[in-house]
Amino acid sequence: MKSIQKKNILHCYVKNHIRYLMSCLLLFTLMLSHSTYASSISKTNITDNGSKQQVSTKQTQLEKIIPQLRVKNFKKKIASIKQLAEIDDPQTIVILEALLNSKLYYQKSDKKVVIINKKNNQYETFSTLNNNAIAIVQKKTLKKITTNNKLRKTIRALLAKKKILNSNLDVRQNALKEILTANDASLLPVLEQAQRQETDKSQQDLLKLAIALIEVHSNNSETRQSAVKRLGNSLYPVAKGKLTKILETDEHGQYIEQDKAVIALAEKAMQRISSKLSLFGNLETLFFGLSLGSVLLLAAIGLSITFGVMGVINMAHGELIMLGAYTTYLVQQLMPNDIGLSLIVAIPAAFIVSGLFGVAIERGVIRHLYGRPLETLLATFGISLLLQQMVRTLISAQNVPVITPSWLSGSLVLNPAFALTYNRIYIFFFALFVFAMLMLILKKTSLGLQVRAVAQNRGMATAMGIKTQWVDSLTFGLGSGVAGVAGVALSQLTNVGPNLGQAYIIDSFMVVVFGGVENLWGTLVAAMTLGITNKFLEPWAGAVMAKIIVLISLIIFIQKRPNGLFPQKGRASGGH
Amino acid sequence: MSALSQVRYKVRDALRRDRTFNHTIIESDAYLQGTHSVHPNELDVSHGPVLYLEDISVSFDGFQALNNLSLYIDDGELRCIIGPNGAGKTTMMDVITGKTHPDSGQVFFGQTMDLSQMAEHDIATAGIGRKFQKPTIFPEHSVWENLELAMKTDKGVWHSLFTVLSAEQKDRIEEVIEIIGLQALYFSKADLLSHGQKQWLEIGMLLMQDPRVLLVDEPVAGMTHQEMDRTAELLTSLAGKHSVVVVEHDMDFVRSIANQVTVLHEGSVLAEGTMEEVQNNQKVIEVYLGE
Amino acid sequence: MVIQSLKKIAVAAAITAATLTTSMVWAADTIKVGVLHSLSGTMAISETTLKDTVLMMIEEQNKKGGLLGKKLEAVVVDPASNWPLFAEKTRELIEKEKVDVIFGCWTSVSRKSVLPVIEELNGLLFYPVQYEGEESSKNVFYTGAAPNQQAIPAVDYLMNDLEVKRWVLAGTDYVYPRTTNKILEAYLLAKGVKKEDIMINYTPFGHSDWQSIVSEIKKFGSQGKKTAVVSTINGDANVPFYKELGNQNISSEDIPVVAFSVGEEELSGIDTKPLVGHLAAWNYFMSVETPENEAFIKKWHSFIKSDKRVTNDPMEATYIGFTMWAKAVEKAKSVKTDAVEQAMIGMTVPNLTGGMAIMNKNHHLSKPVLIGEIQDDGQIETVWSTDGTVAGDAWSDFLPGSKDLISDWTAPIKCGNYNTKTKKCLAK
Amino acid sequence: MLLNYLFPHFMHEDTGGKWLISLLIAITLLVVMFNFFIPESSALHIPTYMVTLLGKYLCLALLAIALDLVWGYCGILSLGHGAFFALGGYAMGMYLMRQIGDRGVYGNAELPDFMVFLNWHELPWYWQGFEYFSFTALMIILVPGLLAYVFGWMTFRSRVTGVYLSIMTQALTYALLLAFFRNEMGLGGNNGLTDFKDILGFSLQADGTRIILFTLSALALISGYIASRFIVQSKLGKTVVAIRDAELRTRFIGYKVEDYKLWIFVFSAMLAGIAGALYVPQVGIINPGEFSPLNSIELAIWVAIGGRGTLFGAVIGALLVNYAKTYFTGALPEFWLFALGTLFIVSTLYLPQGIVGLFSQFTNKQQKQSAKHGALQEETT
């Protein structure tokens, strides 16, 4: 039994997140105010449904229904499942969960239905009746009992009913969310019982909503009115959905709903929800913008060093990002069992790989082209072709899979209408972190000092004993390394393939130029501005038009301020 | 200044952004002509000075390059401007030639032309020529072509496309080549000239423009003594017909040509007078010795 | 001097002329098969596999002794995902290399670019990818799915089995999604779906920032009616799209996505976790268990020397196309376009998923339609399939411009766009 | 130097150009003859396929000249010249689309096919007039010219130069790429315009038309070259070079620099537009891919490889790289990008003056020496 029973992964998963996010102070304060997760786990005693009972009759029932699960027709399968769920036996849950998780198979030889557990390349089979291990077999000898979308939804709802009173808060909560849309009046007593026992606040709210959703359909007008009022307090999409339904009109524009009082209240409730939703909608757009901005920042910041500080137009910058993403892939191939860790390892690895490529490019090509910025553009374009084709030849022309660790998927739910996706949050802070590190390197280290000296006056720097060639290589390596690090982040958002770099190169240049060359702060502000502008334009202009508008505004902006947002200071600018 | 002329400057300012359309400027000038006795595009030196700089201030990101500078250059005068590094000499030239716009103050060419409202090429066409500190010539062109390009003529695009040099124009170029002593190098690429020759070539280009005022920034840097003497000779000979403003570090050279010297310090005029007066000026001595 | 100059010019010209004409034809003791798939550029991701498939088929045919007693010879060129280059390369293949048949193209635009050339030179093209229809050329055989072989059954499945009431038609902004969505919109409206229950959204190629759109879909789907996304999003943009869906906590059970451009090949390049349970509609899945398919997969693995590589629908389409062509050549005893073209019609070849594929008069295949759910191992498992085969429709019945058109390349009509109302062939 | 009598006076110094034009004329004549008069069976017959391919190269060479004018002579590295080329191409494409008439697959006399199946009901206003060749011809020049004028007017006035300018031009063509991808533009979206039937009543499939188009391309290239040469030899050309080398100096001797830049930029854009217009009927398709910034970068590389600031270098570069591309995509389909990439790197590293520079290095040295010796000898000769 133990081997099959799913550990409560979800719980650990949430805890993990909280740990990771403690560092994100900014969001932490937000979390406190909207906390759904931070609340403590309920300690009330809610009796477990599965107390021990006599089994023999149920066994026969089970034995009768289980073979029916093999049918191909999903409608019949659903009917069997519903029958199965009615049997009051803890084993039904095991079977249903196995089916849900694609672990229910039948043996091709004798058509016997078994539960399996994958062990390396072999399958260990277990009895559906008592979970006893049966044998270890080859995959070929088994056939999976297929599920489809609808079937799984049915199973979830059936399981949820059994879990409303579960002692574990997360299980309860997920179960309740599952049945919100069920619209099943028979659930009302259980829900009310749960409401009496419940101590957790968010779960209480959810229960209220669930009850209101059922009571809306009551025959009593007052019950309905109060239910409608309560719906107006909830930000869950189902609440709004229900209200929308109440306010539905026929083809003549007349309300289908007859009860005037209900309509009036529903309209009010709808307004409340809508105004809240639009606020959160704007916050969400802002977050999207910041997130896009952080991606642009990551992509551009390396360029801002090679282009801004060294005056080298590196068209292969995108390919250095791509190399970083491929490094992530290769690191994951080396440590397939520690996906989370591999991502952390990939950061320095990508920095080194792209950095070394950068140094090689600088030593091999760019060194010979200083003072001819437009020629570096052409030569590095050649390099970008080479790198792309190299990856195609050595690895594959196809995209490669980079796995996202669990702590990077999903989202931080601040309230039902406002959730921030974890990968974006991490990437946002990661971008800021990379930015801060670069600032530190440039401002506080001797390398940084030398880099700035060379950037400002190469001749003078040489005269003062700085090995400018060495500084050039390191600077270019640094910029390229940062591009590699950006690749690690991008591998979590988008395809990793030979064309990855192409998608970012033009945007990166725009960011750097917009921000003002030789100014990392400019790059930061520019990236965020472009990201946010883009995202606020997108809803009404569409993704493509938004981008076109941003590009054209940028062209016009540069006319007004040819040196970007934060031009380099000094009276010497302009020559002579 | 009258309210009306203020309006005029506003109009000009607005139109300045449409520099491509010269005709609009001319039209508006014609419209306003009745209020002025002299056409605004003609040089009017009836009051003596050809260049007026009044209370000019310029700052770059907090650095005060020019600080209420006032300076008058008379028509036909040869004026030397000296001052320590950072005194604002080059910035002053930038203001006159339209490269830098003053934060406050007025720059006039003659009585009528407000230089702060004009573009660089208009100022150049109006008769102010400038030689840069570092010789700036067209390296890929021959000596002849360098001079040809600088020649005073219609400098519109379409005219340039079809123009052919006339005999007089050729004579003029040859004349100037002789003045600057580069006869042997007619068709050499300018890039191949020595530093001194480049300085000369640039002066030659100035002469080709036939300007009313020549602004000369460190003309003798990198020249031998002989060359320096020739330059001095040339500049003095130009004075009278042209106004010449020379910025120079070399005191000997200044002494050899100047009768009137202005000392700049921290963006404003510290002293003005003959070389002797300036040299004995207590403030000037402090500034120079204090460094 | 003058004579010398002229001599030089003459020599130079002669040299140039000579280089230009080195591409002369030699005796045809082999049957040449052109392979016109991008090996570089953006489309290389998808198309290189098809090049390998054709090479595999040629190798196998040669093991069997070739065709008409001659060996087959592959001529591979790289049109580099550059559309005008597709036209140029087609011309090169036919005029210079004298190939007898071309297998190639993936994107609609590449096919459109090749079309005038192949018609002018009377060549033969096998096009193996699902596409928007609205075309039937005498010189092209379409072995991929037409919209009625993919999109419409998928929508039927969603409507009948999953009881979907609200529809998001999301696509990349190019002709295939545009046309497919036009057809679907008309189809849905005809089925009584209200206009406000359909949301149509287009994004550029390679779109990677899906935050806003997914959020919009989420809002659209929270109106109390079962919602599904019908995705004609082009290959590359899919991964970030599904990732964003997963991250915004939209499960396949809340809002299922049915995709027409996501196959095993695309799935092998991504972390499939966020996609599990979403749907794909094709005419072939690698997971289908038939002897033919098993043999094909085995052959593929040994040819490509890796048993990690997957097979997909366009590969099956290539397989069917190639096998049919080979049979047609043998039937016609010639490789001449006109003879092969007529021999092709009515040709049958076993599908890899069971049953027979038939080449119809309109140069489209009759094939079964499968709908599958994406599994965590990157395979797609069939959850629904048509009972028999569905005949590919060159002209959609749901577009006002083409509902009266049919294509029939047999006598007496012999026309790609025959108007059944006016009884006229529109081609001139 | 008999050749001198055949050429206008401003080309007397231009040895490379004289050779180039003579060669072009010779090849054009030979190609036409070998295609027309030598039977197909002969080994010397030039297939029409080759003729069209050559025609395409010639159009690209004209485009390269256009870029060389602004980059080589005026120092403006436009990474958006592909946009002007594509606009010219689209103008021609629209004319060719209108010429299809009711021969499209839907038989709609008014609307192109892609509009029919996307349910457009009437022709958008900007398609009006393109049924007339004269109007189209005007647009081929005006549309790119106008875009160049607006963009240049803003940019040159604000004195955006160097790398910034390059990146702005890149942004311009990128924005256009995105815009033309949109199906709402009514220009065929990603598919662009294709399936052309005939031009001025001549079938595009006919060999004769192809030969004529090829000849026209050669003529356009030759006249484009001569016009460009005239410009760079004029005082305007000298001024433009002066701007490239010392912009501030040029300004301070009284030139309105932005006018000059604008003039040459617009001229160049028009030239690019003509090249695009001739390109389209020969390759048979125009789509937004032509706006891709990568195309424009590649274009710059042709010019760099040939040798910029020489005009004939641009032509050589364009022909060479494109021939190499055609050859390698056929001969080494899997590795041609390696070859191309290496070519780009090696040529920028070791041939800063391009191929032309390689040949003229020797003669240049001699010239420099003679220049040092003074001009007296020159005067006497």
Image (cartoon, coloured by chain):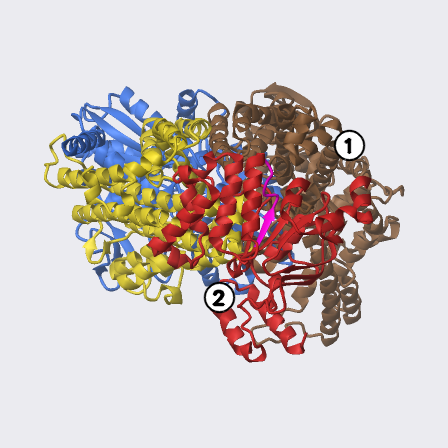
Chain colours: A brown, B red, C blue, D yellow
Observer-nearest of D251 and A77? D251
User: Which residue is found at the position 50% from the left and 71% from the top?
Assistant: B26
**Vertical side of D139 occupied by D28: above or below:** above
Q: Which residues are magenta?
A: B214-223
Residue at image point 58% right, 79% down: B35
Q: Position of residue A510 (x, y in %)?
A: 58, 46
Quarter location, residue C403: bottom left
| Front-lying residue, C241 or A164 | C241
Other-residue count near label 2 (Cα within 10 Å), few / some / many at <14 / 14–19 / ≥20:
few
Numbered disc 2: secondary structure: helix
Report which quarter residue A46 is drawn in.
Answer: top right
> Would you name the residue on which mark 2 appears?
B22
Which of these two is toward me, D206 or B289? Answer: B289
Residue D348 in the figure: left or right of residue A104 = left
Q: Nearer the viewer, residue D339 or C420?
A: D339
Side of A372 relative to C131 (left or right): right
User: Mark 1 highlights which residue?
Assistant: A444
Amino acid under disc 2: Asn
Q: CA distance from mark 2 to mark 1?
A: 53 Å
Residue A170 appearing in the image? yes
For residue C249, say whether it is visible.
no
Quadrant in which the N terminus of chain D appears? top left
Task: Identify the chain of the residue marked 1, using the numbered disc in the image.
Answer: A
Q: Residue at x 42, y 20 (%)?
A: C302
Q: Could you classify mark 1 by the number of other residues whose Cα lies within 10 Å: few (under 14), some (14-19), or many (20 or more)?
A: few
Q: Residue at x 55, y 45 (%)?
A: B233
Quadrant of the rendered structure where residue A245 is?
A: bottom right
Whether residue A47 is situated above or below residue A483 in the rendered picture:
below
